[in-house]
Structure formats: C-alpha cells, structure tokens
Image (cartoon, helix red, strand yellow):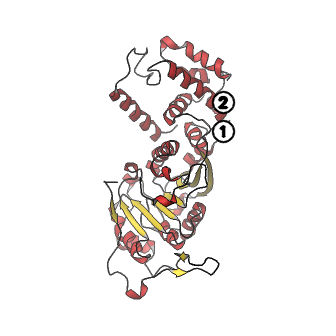
Amino acid sequence: MSKERIITNGIKNVLHQSLVKTPTQVPSSSPGKISLIPSRLPPLPTVRDLVRIYRVRARRSLSQNFLLNKNTNEKIVNSAGIRNGDHVLEIGPGPGSITRQILERGPQQLFVLEKDRRFLPMLEMLASAAYPDQMKIIVGDVMDYTFDNLFPGHLKKEWHEESPDIRIIGNLPFNVSTPLIIKWLRMMSNHSGFYEMGRIPLTLTFQREVAERMVAQVMDYQRSRLSIMCQHLCHVKIRFTIKGKSFVPTPKVDAAVVKFIPLIEPKINLPFNVVEKFVRHLFIYRNKQIHKCLRTLFPKDMHDLNEELFIKSGIERDLRPTMLSIDEIGSLCHVYHEFCTENRGLFEFNYQTRKKLAISQFSDQQQQQQQQQQADTWINED
C-alpha cells in the first residue's frame, strides 16, 4: 500500500487528560478478556455541528450525500454484525457518522478509508477520542487499493471455515458503487486482496435500483448481469431501504443497505473473467432470444458453435435472458469455456472490432484494451 498515508495518532492535545480512556475488564464470564466497548465516547460536537463548523459541503463531483441520522447509522452497523473485538474497514466515512457507531461497538481495530481530505479534522478528532491505536485513517481512493496485509495474519480462516472476525462496511457514493463491487467480486472469486483472509462479509449502501438488480430472481424485469455476478458468488440480501430525504443533500433516489456473504463454492465454478464475459454478452440484448445475444461471442466463420452451444448444454435457444436460472447459465458458460479451450483466441474475440477470428494470438495490448472496455461497461449497468 505504497500510495496510502495512514494517520495513527489523530489530533494532538485535543482532549483533556481526564477524558483519555483505558480498556476495562468485561464480566468474569470471560476472564482476562479486554472489552473495547466504551460506556460512551467522550463529549464531542455532533456530526451535523462539525459539518457546519468546518463548512464542509457535499461535492456533486464525488457523488457525496451525508447520512447524519443516528438511528439509521446505528441500523447499518447492526446489519454488519460488528462485535466487540472485531477488525473493521469502513469505506468513505465522510464526517464520521457511521464511524461513531462502529466505535461504540468496541472494535479491536478500525480502519477508515477517505478520499476527501476535508474530512480529516473530524476523523482525527474521533481517532483521538478512541482508545490508543484503535482507529487508523487511510487517505486515498478505494479503487486503488486491494488492502493486502491490512489485517493481522492470525485472523486468517480457510475458505470453507466460518468468516474471520473482520467486517467491511461503507456508505458508498453512487458513482463508484457498481465498479467497486465488481472489483471486490473479482477478488472474492480469486481469493485475493483482503479475501486472502477468508470469507469476509460486506455491508454496503447502494442506489435502491442497483440493489434491486443485485437480488433480482428469475423472471424479474430487474434481472441483469449484475444479478448473476453477485448471486453466483454470494448470498446477497437487501437488509433495509433508506429514503432519499434521510441524506444531506437529498438525492432524487432512495438507497438500500445490502449484505454480501461469500459462498463456500461459487455456483458457476469457472474463472471470473470467463463468467463475466459470458454473462455480459447474454444480457447484451435483454429482450431478445438468447441465441441472438450469444451470437456476439463468436466470429462469423464460427457461428456453428452458437448452435452447438445449445445442443451440448441442453438449453432452449429461444428463451429470454431473464428466464434463465444460474444453473442454466452455468451450463451454457461451461460449454463456452470448452469452446475457448479448443479454439485459440476465441475468448479474446471482440465482435465489435473483428468479423473473423485471427490465426495468431492477440497481443497483450489488445487484451488490456478489452479489459478496460469491460470495466467501463459496468459503470453504466443496464
């Protein structure tokens, strides 16, 4: 994490010495264990007052909307299941509304990642009010980080075991939420980044419409590639919705809190890039029959493979994309992967630029351009 700056000590000499807290012993039922749950944080200005004092206004360019309602923030933290002694990563804390509720739960360690430096004084004040070294501030863009080696190694659990004592939470700006969850789903599939530590649950806020796509089932008009990518890797559930009027400034849309719990085994047991490309083409024409959608996977001189795809998988070719279950999509995807293994360069084929499959392998530069194009399409999810 060479790009990051971590602030560990917070503001100096802000609090009187009498307000500095030390850990207290929990009841005798857990002898020797230290509780990090404070009876209350030391007296601090409210988040609303801090926003006024520091004259911080939400920036439209960063898609910022402050969630200042204490009850709503407490509900988000409860949904994340944060307990005393957990290790927590909060994305986009802003002025620290959710951060305060997390500290009230007594985490062993709390990392907050914030891109906007205007919020540093407010976050540093919270860091000073917490136990020594309990809260650390990372300054940077979440899209630049994989968080390798952020959490201590002793927390690591095998993928088939229960989740480690790590929680990730965030009130995400709407403009970054979809690309970010796709990035994290890729890490989840590869067991890379912080997913080297095990099946860490995520509790994140999204625009309500995006959240509904994530959980949409068969025959739901909201069902999309985002539905498949989330559901084949996670148990995904909308915990509750948040009215737009709860935010400052008030957006034109409502939000929803979504919890993701990684599955032990993905429902489509193939590399992430293969599943992502296949599903993207499957939903390219949402209202057309799937044989017309999947034709874009093959060059003109190999369209016979499109027909063979349905014969080998046993799936009817005249269905619509929203009619397919994940198991049926998995059957089609496995056959496509088999075709890619047998035909060099087929996976790299891009129907928008090539009519026929090149004999030689595609260059690394062409592959990188395709990956960038794939990433861009997630920003404007259908």
In the displayed image of the protein, which residue is found farthest to the bottom?
Answer: 18
Q: Quadrant of the N terminus?
A: bottom left
Residue name at image x 64 percent, y 33 percent: 322
| Local crowd size for mark 2, using a 10 Å CA cut-off: few (<14), some (14–19), many (≥20) | some
Residue 332 coordinates in the image, percent (x, y): 61, 26
107 relative to 311 in the view: left or right:
left
Is residue 324 visible in the rendered structure shown here? no
Q: Which residue is mark 2?
A: 328
Q: Which mark is residue 342?
A: none
Task: Examine the image and state in which quarter residue 25 appears.
Answer: bottom right
Q: Secondary structure at mark 2?
A: helix
> Looking at the image, which is closer to me, 222 or 102?
102
342 relative to 147 in the view: left or right:
right
Q: Which residue is mark 1?
A: 220
**Is residue 247 depicted above or below 300 in this figure?**
below
**Is residue 298 depicted above or below 37 in this figure?**
above
What amino acid is at disc 1?
Asp
**Is residue 20 depicted above or below 101 in this figure?**
below
Task: Examine the image and state in which quarter residue 375 appears.
Answer: top left
Instruction: Measure the alpha-carbon separation of dots 1 and 2.
Output: 16 Å
Mark 1 against mark 2, which lies toward the viewer? 2
Residue 240 coordinates in the image, percent (x, y): 62, 57
Residue 196 coordinates in the image, percent (x, y): 49, 50
Query: Which tag, 1 or 2, sits closer to the chain's start?
Result: 1
> Looking at the image, which is closer to me, 245 or 33?
33
What amino acid is at disc 2?
Glu
> Looking at the image, which is closer to me, 306 or 283?
306
Q: Secondary structure at mark 1?
A: loop
| Local crowd size for mark 1, using a 10 Å CA cut-off: few (<14), some (14–19), many (≥20) | few
